[in-house]
Amino acid sequence: MRIISGIYRGKNLYSPQSDKVRPTSDRAREAIFNILYSKLEKSFSEIELLDIFSGTGAFALEAVSRGVKSATLIDIDTKDLQKNVNLFPKEKNKISILRLDATKLPLSSKKYDIVFMDAPYNKGLSEKALQQLHLQKWLKTNTLCIVEIEKNEHIDIPEEYLLIDERRYGLAQVLFLSYKG
């Protein structure tokens, strides 16, 4: 695993220690960022990013490399992502790690512009996390939520979200949702 673009382009990341962690492929990550750039209404340097089910933290760290204002990473097990975050000591003021269950989020005082979510496949966790983000006030109106699921997985998108795009990359399906607020 490596950073694809930005100021840390080519920087290697630690691979996951657990077989329960399945990082988003480099190809899919690159494609998602290309789509993001086309959909954003403000500069990447103004974006507050939330990465849920962070795993290794590769998506959020890619965003940091590309100049995101801040990145918050959430996972139940933070060992893998902490090792990778430690590779970016100059960015420690931009990166926050929260050891939380994304299906039981607390009320948030901070709201995010982009959410990336890559839950374990076929467990219904994405739907629960989307509900929690809404109920616990983690999102701004029009927050862009990127949800990676298995290509044959079905999720019921909560009514607070609008599906604006979807793509397939190998075994993954990526949904782009806008939070209605």
Image: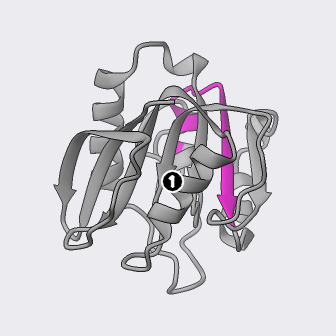
Q: Residue under label 1, please give it.
A: 130
Q: Is residue 23 left or right of residue 58?
A: left
Q: Write down the region rendered in magenta.
A: 62-75
Camera sees residue 178: yes
Name of the residue lying farthest toward the bottom: 19
Does 135 lie within the magenta span? Answer: no
Name of the residue lying farthest toward the top: 42
- The residue depicted at 57 percent of the width and 50 percent of the height is 51
Q: Quadrant of residue 129?
A: bottom right
Give above or below for 16 relative to 110.
Answer: below
**Residue 47 in the image: x percent, y percent?**
57, 24
**Residue 152 in the image: x percent, y percent?**
19, 73
Camera sees residue 12: no
Q: Secondary structure at mark 1?
A: helix
- The residue depicted at 41 percent of the width and 14 percent of the height is 41
Look at label 1 and name its amino acid: Leu
